[in-house]
Amino acid sequence: MDETTRGWGSGLIGVMIFAGSLPATRAAVAGFTPLFLTSARAVIAALIAAALLVALREKRPERDDLVSLTLIALGVVIGFPLLTALALTHITAAHSIVFIGLLPLSTAIFAVVRGGERPKPAFWVFSCLGSASVAGFALRESGGASLTGDLLMLAAIIVCGLGYAEGAHLSRRLGGWQVISWALVLALPFTAALALATWPPEWTGIGAPAVAGLAYVSVFSMLVGFVFWYRGLALGGAAGVGQLQLLQPFLGLMLAALVLGEGIAWTMVAATGLTILCVAGAKRFA
């Protein structure tokens, strides 16, 4: 198996782990506020990451790496979770998928700007078609829009794309799990302060599903998923492997159907099939 194929395989595992965030977050927000959930997941993941870095005696990043780690922390540890949590107070979760469909395109653009990647012209055609497929499905299923919510989601997509591309570039030298671990530790002072500021006044009424949801997004969505995701981006190229994110909304909705008993519409099946074809095309020309 060549390096590129291993990268796509690792990236797919990362996307499958991230897809579980949808039902897990829905369960968690039944007991926790979005701001506490955003900060607590980062704090828990950072503590685990710090323990691993110390136990394995990992070498500290060089001073030149701090800029990249800061961009990663601002993008995927703080920016994306916080901005999406704020956006979801103005728009529905279904409407937010419109913007999630733009995330692979954002990642690809930053992979060119920051990582020096040069996909073929046909790649951009498939990438845009895939994004349009996801966005079109979401627009059909979503409720009303909000300018504030839309602007927050757009900002979230931009900073997350930057964080993904920056992490892929740095992972080639430091390693995938080391990059996300150092980024989590770097963001810990801010996330810990936010967690304390939004600490729930009462814990007795918080159910087991909410706690389980918090545990999943903390350990898997915030840490384990990034181990596979950054490795995949580094091996297979951020622009190409990043297109796998187009499948994340559909995988998340399928998991929600299995875990939460939500229905699956024929439009989702059709959009998923078209998206898979676009991802395959993007892989061919990346």
Image: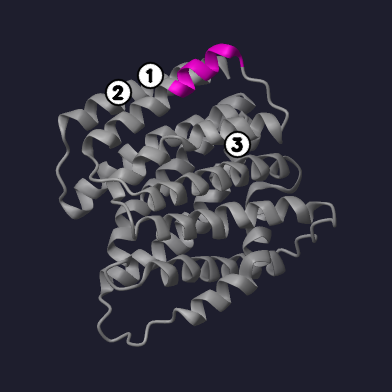
Give the residue displayed 58% in from the left and 30% down from the top.
108
Q: Residues in magenta?
A: 120-128
**Is the C-beta separation of discs 1 and 2 under 8 Å?**
yes
Sequence-first tag of 3 and 2: 3
Residue labelled with disc 3: 233
Report the residue that reaches farthest toward the front: 147
| 32 magenta-colored | no
x and y, in percent, of residue 187 in the image: 63, 66
Q: Report the disc number at residue 66.
A: none
Please name whichever residue, 79 or 255, is drawn nearer the observer in this view of the structure: 79
* Relative height, residue 165 to residue 153 (above, below): above
- What secondary structure is found at the residue carrying circle 3? helix
The quarter of the picture where the N terminus appears is top right
Give the residue displayed 38% in from the left and 19% down from the top.
277
x and y, in percent, of residue 64 in the image: 84, 52
Q: Report the disc number at residue 277.
A: 1
Q: How is the image coloured?
A: one colour
**Res. 52 in view:** no
- What secondary structure is found at the residue carrying circle 2? helix
Whole-angstrom CA distance, mark 3 to mark 2, is 23 Å
x and y, in percent, of residue 6 in the image: 57, 31
Amino acid at dot 1: Leu
**Res. 237 in view:** yes
The quarter of the picture where the C terminus appears is top right
Q: Report the disc number at residue 273.
A: 2
Q: Residues within 10 Å of mark 1 (few under 14, many from 20)?
A: some
Please name whichever residue, 246 or 74, is drawn nearer the observer in this view of the structure: 74
Whole-angstrom CA distance, mark 3 to mark 1, is 20 Å
Amino acid at dot 2: Gly
Give the residue displayed 57% in from the left and 78% down from the top.
193
